[in-house]
């Protein structure tokens, strides 16, 4: 749980990956806008660094979501995300049922 909030049930891996891609594109457009509009060099550099850090973090999360289906543990910035494919959900459920109980 992040800041006391949970992700809604309709938010699945495919939706999140698409949203993250849109977020990266928007952030890169903001980078271009800041580069052209902000006049003070220090402010420009700080804003560009912050926006690029956001873009890199979002892209890294998107890449992790692409690989998470293999181990059935999809997370986005620490939040669990549902698998959208019914076939993958069944496969993950079968894997969980086959694992021996620990404890």
Image: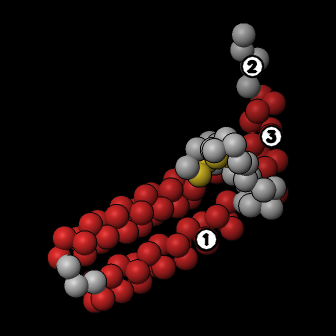
Tell me the residue that label 1 is attached to.
19
Mark 1 vs mark 3, CA separation in Å: 26 Å
Mark 1 vs mark 2, foreground winner is 1
Q: Earlier in the sequence, mark 1 or mark 2?
A: 1
Does residue 65 appear in this view? Answer: yes
Tell me the residue that label 3 is attached to.
93
Q: Residue furthest left?
A: 41
Mark 3 vs mark 2, CA separation in Å: 13 Å
Q: Residue at x 78, y 56 (%)?
A: 8
Mark 1 vs mark 2, CA separation in Å: 36 Å
Q: Residue at x 72, y 14 (%)?
A: 102
Q: In this view of the protein, which residue sits in the foreground, 23 or 103?
A: 23
Q: Which SS class for mark 1?
A: helix
Tell me the residue that label 2 is attached to.
100
Q: Is residue 93 left or right of residue 31?
A: right
Q: Residue at x 74, y 19 (%)?
A: 100
How far across and down, in percent of the image, does residue 69 sit? 64, 51
Q: Where the N terminus falls, by quadrant?
A: top right
Does residue 68 appear in this view? Answer: no
Residue 92, located in which quarter of the rendered image?
A: top right
Q: Earlier in the sequence, mark 3 or mark 2?
A: 3
């Amino acid at each position: 749980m992040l800041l006391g909030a949970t992700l809604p049930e309709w938010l699945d891996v495919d939706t999140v990956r698409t949203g993250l891609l849109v977020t990266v594109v928007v952030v890169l457009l903001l980078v271009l806008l800041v580069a052209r509009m902000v006049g003070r060099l220090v402010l420009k550099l700080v804003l560009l660094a912050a926006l690029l850090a956001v873009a890199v973090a979002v892209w890294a999360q998107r890449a992790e979501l692409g690989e998470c289906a293999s181990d059935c543990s999809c997370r986005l910035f620490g939040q669990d995300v549902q698998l959208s494919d019914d076939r993958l959900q069944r496969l993950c459920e079968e894997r969980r049922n086959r694992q021996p109980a620990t404890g």
